[in-house]
Image (cartoon, rainbow, N blue to C red):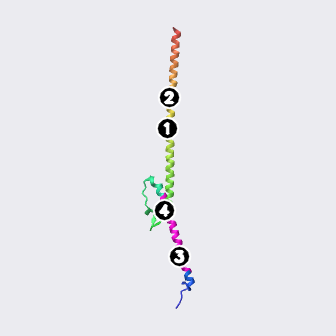
């Protein structure tokens, strides 16, 4: 009757091994729950970022055997944030250009009104001078 050196030889060692396994299993369970929560939150953020783009995203795209591929999700989130930021910058530039165009149009219209008014004043002055000349001749 030989005893393997890898097996516990007494009851205390056996109990300690069971306790260690239980602790490890609890730790693994907690780690899995944490990964799942993190995956759910990252997926929610990604879905929110991508909703305007009309992209179809499914949980299955980011899960392997029911577990979240956090690295893939993190990379997708990073790219989606960058794309949204670029889109916002483009929109802001477009908006600024449109505002500048409106301002230029208003300015041009104002300049045209001012020029027309100056021309009218000049015509009135010419008429007044002509009337004065005619009056003085008589």
Disc on the earlier residue, 4 or 2: 4
Q: Which residue position holds label 1?
A: 102
Q: Is residue 107 above or below residue 42?
A: above
Q: What distance separates the C-alpha of mark 1 from that of mark 4?
A: 46 Å
Q: What distance separates the C-alpha of mark 1 from that of mark 3?
A: 71 Å
Query: What label does residue 113 carry, if any?
Result: 2
| Residue 69 screen position, x and y as percent | 48, 64
Residue at far top of view: 138
Q: Secondary structure at mark 1?
A: helix
Do the CB atoms of the residues marked 3 and 4 lie less than 8 Å apart?
no
Q: What distance separates the C-alpha of mark 1 from that of mark 2?
A: 16 Å
In this view, the mark in front (4 or 2) = 4
Q: Is residue 109 above or below residue 72?
A: above
Disc on the earlier residue, 2 or 3: 3
Give the magenta-colored segment's residue range: 16-45
Do the CB atoms of the residues marked 4 and 2 lie less than 8 Å apart?
no
Q: Secondary structure at mark 3?
A: helix
Q: Which residue position holds label 3?
A: 22
Count residues near mark 4 (Cα–Cα under 10 Å), then give few for <14, some for 14-19, many for 20+. some
Query: What label does residue 40 carry, if any?
Result: 4
Query: What label does residue 77 carry, if any?
Result: none
Q: What distance separates the C-alpha of mark 3 from that of mark 4?
A: 27 Å
């Amino acid at each position: 009757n030989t005893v393997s050196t890898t097996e516990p030889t007494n009851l205390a060692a056996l109990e300690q091994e069971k306790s260690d396994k239980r602790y490890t299993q609890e730790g693994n369970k907690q780690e899995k729950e944490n990964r799942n929560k993190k995956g759910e939150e990252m997926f929610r953020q990604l879905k929110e970022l991508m909703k305007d783009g009309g992209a179809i995203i499914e949980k299955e795209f980011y899960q392997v055997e029911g577990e979240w591929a956090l690295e893939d999700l993190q990379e997708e989130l990073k790219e989606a944030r960058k794309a949204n930021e670029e889109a916002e910058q483009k929109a802001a530039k477009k908006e600024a250009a449109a505002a500048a165009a409106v301002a230029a149009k208003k300015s041009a219209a104002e300049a045209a009104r001012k020029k027309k008014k100056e021309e009218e004043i000049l015509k009135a002055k010419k008429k007044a001078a002509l009337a004065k000349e005619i009056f003085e001749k008589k």
